[in-house]
Amino acid sequence: MGPAHRVREGRTTGLAGGRAVAAGSAARTLVAAIARALRGTDCADLGHPGPLLRLAGVPESVRRAAVARAAGRVALTGGQAAEVDAGQVARWFADQYPRRRYPGVLLGSPHGAAAHLALALGVPWLPAGFELSVHWPQGAVDEPQAALDHGAALTARLLKDNPDVHIRQVHCPATRGALAGATVALAARWRRLPAAYLRFLADCLEPGAPVLLLCDARTWPVFDSAPGHSFQVGCPSSGLDPVDFHPDSPVLRQVLRSSGGDGARWCPPEAVGSPRAAEHAVEPGFEQSVQQWAVVHRCSSHRMLVPNPAVLSAATADLYRHWLRAAGKTGNRLVVECGRLLDPWQVVRAGMVPYWCENATQRSVEGVEWWLAGSEPFSSVDVLPEPPGLRSPAVAGLPQWLAVAGFGRRRRALDRSAARGYPVTSVPTRRATEVLRAQSYDLPTPPPMTIAAALAVLRDAGSHQGLLVS
């Protein structure tokens, strides 16, 4: 590691790590949930910013304005974005975990099932990147070219002191609604293991402990704006296809109308780019540095290549059923989580099987429906749909969520608080804790699985769906 890199990791003028990471982003939520679970506590203190709980019945224009104002209160200014220190962000993630020796570690792409897998193994999870939300003054949801221009200027300043990250900018009104016109979304991905991670691995892993890297393998058309900065219009988690973001798409017009935009103004960059790894992928250099670390420290390294989130969710749910039954429990009670609505500690405390939906899109819900249709029946099914806070033709309706709950033989429960005002309201992360706390205890909790045993179950459960475990 060169001297310049050491200076960057140690500089004290950068924006504090916790302030830099976007509020409510996947990596932030997952690290918080896993760190609490490893301490034996739940997510009762985790909220979600925004005033949407109070705005279910107001006109769309008023609601969109309130969303933009709320985003403005938590987003970074351009000057703050330039002060972000990716090294401090890595340290902030690592410092959330209890300092003790762990039998392994998970790293890589964000996925709710990783939280449950980490707790079953008794190991931490460290993200391969993080998200930033930055003000876009006079922005417009229907002007992706203007978003690119603004994001390129922000990224150039950010990369000046952070050459070890790649910035993927995502302009997606289907997932962010009016926020796509008030802020720009930047996904920063480390090109190698940051120094704080290297210290954490050296200090907190048992000798020879294995390392497991989780890689999101989804692709999307990507445009290279400049060295270190790439741009994509739309994203896989939207529940739409790249063609749906074409100017002539009726789906796009519907999305923009719901977000306060005008389809006639939509003019994406001419060079739309070729399909490449989407925003939550792991940088090749990061993966290489993980492998190199494992070789130097004489431990095994493994990779899980996930073609879509439903595959890992299903395999992890099957793993939990296997794990619970090996400990003498029934494994017949299911909780279907969604987005930020998860609590790994309460799931284990109640002896439940968790299935995580990435979001409330029809595709995500269809994934759990197909898995349930092919699984041994569950006696109870509790469903926690996270309202996306916007309307989109890709969002699942409440009848589809009710159909998921209907797979329960005795108990079929759809959380009423999440359903109230769906899909335009918002509920805090702690709502999952409140629902799961009401479940009966099933103690003691099972002893942690070994990584070797877990990988064997995951290979068996997920290989036919394309989950590659090596």
Image (tube, helix red, strand yellow):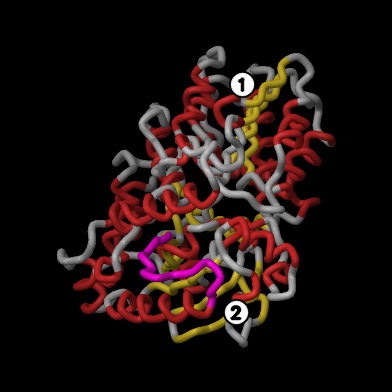
Looking at the picture, does residue 147 appear above or below residue 201?
A: below
- Residue 325 in sight: no
Q: Vertical placement of 209 versus 89: above or below? A: above
Tell me the distance, in whole angstroms, between the alpha carbons under discs 1 and 2: 54 Å
Q: Which residue is drawn at 78% across and 26% down?
A: 407
**Quarter of the image that includes the N terminus:** bottom left
Whether the magenta-drawn stretch holds residue 140 is answered as: yes
Name the kind of residue labelled 2 in the image. Answer: Pro
Dot 2: what SS? Answer: loop
Badge 1 amino acid: Ala
Q: Are marks 1 and 2 in contact (CB under 8 Å)?
A: no
Q: Mark 2 points at which residue?
A: 268
Labels 1, 2: front one: 2
Nearer-N-terminus badge (1/2): 2
Which SS class for mark 1? loop
Report the quarter where the C terminus lies. Answer: bottom right
Residues in magenta, as a range: 131-144
Which residue is labeled 1 in the image? 327
Picture coordinates of residue 197, whole percent (x, y): 35, 58
- For the view shown, which residue lies furthest in the left direction? 12
Where 307 falls versus 276 (above or below)? Answer: above
Left or right, residue 32 beside residue 421: left
439 falls in the magenta region: no
